[in-house]
Amino acid sequence: MNLKELVTGDSGEKRFLLGNEAAVRGLIEAGISIAATYPGTPSSEIGNVLSVLAKDANIYFEFSTNEKVAMEVAATAAVSGLRSFTFMKHVGMNVAADSFMTTAYSGVNGGMVILSADDPSLFSSQNEQDTRNYAKLANVPILEPSNCQEVKDMVKYAFDLSEQFKLPVIVRTTTRVSHMRGVVEFGDVRDNSSNNDNHWKRGHFNKDPSKYVPVPAFAGDMHVRLWDKIRKIEEVSNKSKFNCEWGTGKKYGLIASSSAFNYACDVVKFNNLDIKILKLGFSYPFPQNKVIEFLSDLDEVFVVEEVDPIIERDTLVCIGSKNLNVQVHGKLDGTFPIYHEFNSDIVAEGLNKVLNFKENKSVQFTQSLEKLSEDIPSRAPVLCAGCPHRAMYYGINIAIEELGLKPEDVIFASDIGCYTLGINPPYNAADYLLSMGSSVGDGCGFSVSTDQKVASFIGDSTFFHSGISPLINAVHNKHNFVLTVLDNRITAMTGGQPNPGIPVDGMGDDAPEVSIRKLALACGCDFVRVINPFNLEQVVKTYREAFERKDAAVIISKAPCTLIKGLTRKPPVKFIESNCNNCDKCVKELACPAISKINGKITIDESQCDGCTACIQVCKYGALEDGR
Amino acid sequence: MDNHYNIYICGVGGQGIIKTSTIIGEAAMNQGLDVVMSEIHGMSQRGGSVSTELKIGGYNSSIIPKQGADMLLSFEPVETIRGLDKVNSETKIVYNTHPIIPSSTDKQYPNVDSITKTLKENFKYVLPIDGTQLAMDAGSVLALNMVLLGAVTADDKFPLTKESVIEAMKNNLKPKFHEMNLKAIESGYNSIKS
């Protein structure tokens, strides 16, 4: 499918879409004017698609420096009367939270929707976290789509709801919804075009400090108004078409949301279980009356939801407040696991504990297959062949060795990005990690609390996201560590989005390039060096110098990510067998996926080798040669 | 349960697994079938294990239960073993015999012939093909995914026609490569049919 069909497709047409693509179609149907994000998987593809389509869809789109900034861009657009959208992954909500919380007080005029993508089972995240807690914390409504059609429909509906109550609305997806593909039927598109010269419609902000400036004198009233809204919205969630029932079960019921609903639904259907199902797509404000009505003639109810037992606790409140005699099976009584994502097997196992419908059938394999299954090598995600980070890690470890430091003498404070994969042997280059930008703040802390050397690593995009303020802290408070900014000219881990360090913006237009070197200098760093990680000699020399210093030294390791589109690939490295001394340094110490030892002989996988030449510098015997 | 068909597709990042799965899904949609698919993105998956799950016929969830696959399509021998959770004794196992050696050195990479032998001892339908070679014969190692796509369409139980799969391929890949990809699909198809 051509992505432009998300804009040009007519009502009634069907496409096989990724959940994130369906979200974009929802935005187009809702006629939004402004969208902003910081890339975070599993929400990243929304930005990639918007980046391609923004102009065709009359949308202003930006990759902001972090989620809080993106939240502020969307909030100000919405308060100026435009429909605006911001999206992020669950941990991005933590960054955005400060502004998000008050957006609930100040409210909006045009519809504002926040999509937050949770990641149960942490496929690509540092924690498991449930966005639904933020809905409760801030008092804003939340919708939980379970499939691609619902992603589109709920995103579109969320704008109407937001405009009706002048309050932002959250759409919570999970990895299995964001990265699910399914058939989506398109609906009508609301026109967002304007009669002025801009791509998108301009709004207007009507000043009213009592509504929009939460100084204590005003904010108290704002909180009262917020609760008034939430009480009214509860009437809407009680009647919402997104909260609906199936089945005829009289004794057993099941309440589920999001992808957990899908698993539950399949288990009930394919095992012919007599269970009545209530699906909650609009789960906060909690539809109490709807749930009480559902529970009223049941004996037992299962609550199936991923991450935290939020619906389960609210269900217990309903039962308690009405003195209903219904037993609840969920996470709290151990029927279902309290962490990690669900699947049909897990849900079936939980239901089976109560209903005993399933025989335990296991497949008997031969011993040789069982042995084979145990003996296969792992295939963890690794730094790509040709990745500049590998060359830098190799170099810094040599410098540390040359300085006579032992591995335990140097703490590696890592950050969120591909380079976190440096945690793997042989680099072992990640000892501590909290969040985006944390490597720099961690460098500050380790430098005052230990006598060890500290090496902090941060990517270019992450540096712009939240690496600058801790660097200012480091300089002012005289902290001593070596900060490496791994500038690979892209936001690589989430799929290659631009950041302020490159001369292109999110809509593909030319944009001023913000210099990391000048920023570091402006923060007050005295030692700021830009190195080419593929020049091993320069790398080692620069790190040796940096580790001798007593201040915050900044090294910018600058070379493009090997996956950037349009880069010409260099010819693969050649192996000269007669020169090989079998020292295995290239395999064991560089660990490039393009080099392996097969049947006792070094082999270069030409389909992977990027011709980066790092291995040539590692081999002392001249057994590896430039392919040019 | 007629008209239900679950395909678990696995291999190594960079082999074109997601594209192949999308093509099957689009073909299913065009034939009016209900289809859902799950894929995993994020982290640097080049060189890491990658899998997708395709379910045709009235499912809500896009995840195939344990032993629930009708077809295990694997782009790499060791990944075939990693995917065995999803198969039962009736599952067709089609896999590319060309290994990609991982950089991790925790375990020795097993001999591919012994993988085939062990699989054949345990399952009725084990169909190894040298997809990498067939792809190179068709014009490029990058056509491996189309060879394996052709192999899936050759399964008697597969609910989609070869024609609709080819149509979806054309809709998803550059016209410049259509001829090579058609050749690849045919060679994958024939390697199973013959």
Image: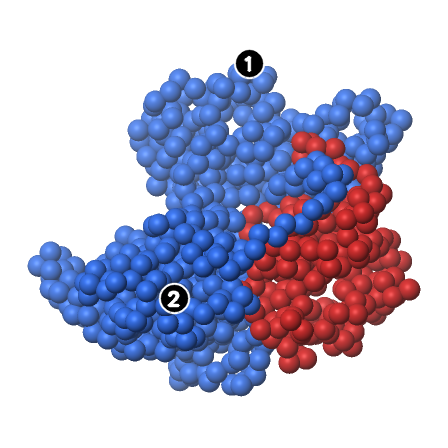
Chain for disc number 2: A
Amino acid marked by disc 1: Gly
The spot of residue A422 in percent (x, y) is 56, 35
Q: Does residue A224 show up?
A: yes
Residue named by callout 1: A404
Q: Which quadrant, please, contains the C terminus of chain A? A: top right
Q: Which of the two labelled residues, at mark 2 and mark 1, occupies the earlier sequence position?
A: 2
For marks 2 and 1, give the one nearer the viewer: 2
Q: Few, some or many C-alpha atoms within 10 Å of disc 1 (few <14, some 14-19, many ≥20)?
A: few
Q: Which colour scheme appears in the figure? A: by chain
The spot of residue A230 in percent (x, y) is 21, 68
The residue positioned farthest toward the left in the image shown: A217
Amino acid marked by disc 2: Tyr
Which residue is found at the position 68% from the left and 80% from the top? B31
Do residues under tags 2 and 1 come within 8 Å of each other at their CB atoms?
no
Residue named by callout 2: A252
Q: Is residue B11 above or below residue B111?
A: below
Chain letter for the red part: B
Please identify the quarter of the rendering in which residue A108 is found: bottom left
Q: In terms of depth relative to the viewer, which is nearer, A299 or A139?
A: A299
Which residue is found at the position 35% from the left and 41% from the top? A469
